Image (spheres, rainbow, N blue to C red):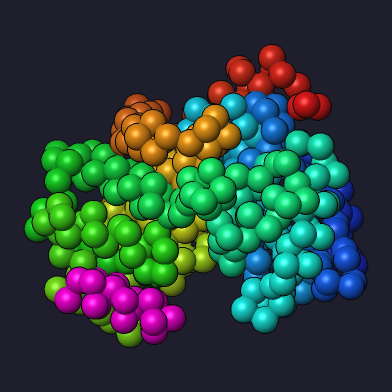
Amino acid sequence: MSTPGSSADLSTVDVFDLGREHEQVVFASDPASGLKAVIALHSTALGPGLGGTRFHPYASTADAVRDVLALSRGMSYKNALAGLDHGGGKAVIIGDPRRDKSEALLRAYGRFVQSLHGRYLTACDVGTTSVDMDLIARECDFVTGRTVAHGGAGDSSVLTAYGVFQGMRASAEHLWGSTSLEGRTVGIAGVGKVGRHLVGHLLDDGARVVVTDVHAPAVDRVRTEHPEVTVVATTEELVASDLDVYAPCAMGGALDDDVVEVLKARIVCGAANNQLAHPGIEKALEERGILYAPDYCVNSGGVIQVADELEGFSFERAHQRAAGIFDTTRSVLDLARTDGVPAALAADRMAERRMRDVGRLHGIWLG
């Protein structure tokens, strides 16, 4: 999926041009608590926009806007491909969550989400937790991804990792004729949440696992849980290693020209959002014979989990739905082969078809 954006400052860009595909972009400010947030609704054709709240120390408001626009668009495609009756929305809070997060700030944010009257449903993302969602929910009715103690599903990274593993199995079947990763070497960049759970699935399947993370405690935890895992110092070292599968599980833009040039893995399948650094990378991967499992296809286990929570959470039901990522990934790869296009484009076509065919029944969601 191509990612909109520009390196230009917001002062030189018409915001309507920057977010021309989006229905609504809301800027939220509460100086008393320090809240500065942006909520973006890409599409509500399939239902209310569903997507997490990212808390991150962006270098500028322009960077935050570009990120929230790309992420909310990605959620439209992710939710459509996952078969959910939800459109795409996302929010970013500008700041360092370790320093700036507070009850007052989160509750102020909750009131802004509430003001959208259900057009946007929020959940966890990078920098936010289920406990944070509980605080937001004290001011807002449109929150999911809550703690088990408050009737929620808890940590959504569990099913996100499970879904990525299913996407990896489908990719292995497509390329090597077997769904097993036994004997394969898988490199994981980022083992804080999803990546950590993914390690366990891969080891249980007989894979060799190599990991890296900029956060030393995350690596130490994986080492303690799985001493057999190999650790390398940097992502650059990881991508240049003799891998069969590369799993980017940290921030976006993981697949740029430099990475594609040196990458030895035959499959890329990871949990990070917006992995393609710019349009055309998917073609470069294909030219090098690298199968790319589209990120928003394989990492949808988390949103499947939090969407299930809105019905009254059942882990068994959500787990079964997340297992369907295997079949969805297989369908995407089969369509790519049939149409002679990169898998990223095939996934876009499948998502866009559902948004068009089902979305026309709904139009803009008003609640």
**Residue that extends furthest to the front in the rendered view of this protein:** 149
Who's the residue at 65% across and 66% down the image? Answer: 55
Q: Quadrant of residue 144?
A: top right
Q: Which residues are magenta?
A: 210-227
Residue 125 is situated, as x and y percent measured from the top left of the image, at: 57, 58
> In the picture shown, does residue 21 fall above or below 68?
above
Residue 262 is situated, as x and y percent measured from the top left of the image, at: 33, 71
Nearest the eye: 182 or 102: 102
Who's the residue at 54% across and 30% down the image? Answer: 311
Point out the image quarter for the C terminus.
Answer: top right
> In the picture shown, does residue 92 fall above or below 40?
below
Who's the residue at 36% across and 44% down the image? Answer: 163
Nearest the eye: 195 or 352: 195
Q: Quadrant of residue 36?
A: bottom right
Nearest the eye: 99 or 252: 99
Q: Looking at the image, can residue 291 be seen?
A: no
Marks counted in the figure total: 0
> In the picture shown, does residue 65 fall above or below 167?
below
Residue 257 is situated, as x and y percent measured from the top left of the image, at: 46, 67
Who's the residue at 26% across and 39% down the image? Answer: 170
Q: Is residue 272 magenta?
A: no
Q: Looking at the image, can residue 126 be seen?
A: yes
Point out the image quarter for the N terminus.
Answer: top right
> In the picture shown, does residue 38 fall above or below 366?
below
Question: Residue 154 vs residue 323: left or right?
Answer: right
Residue 135 is situated, as x and y percent measured from the top left of the image, at: 68, 58
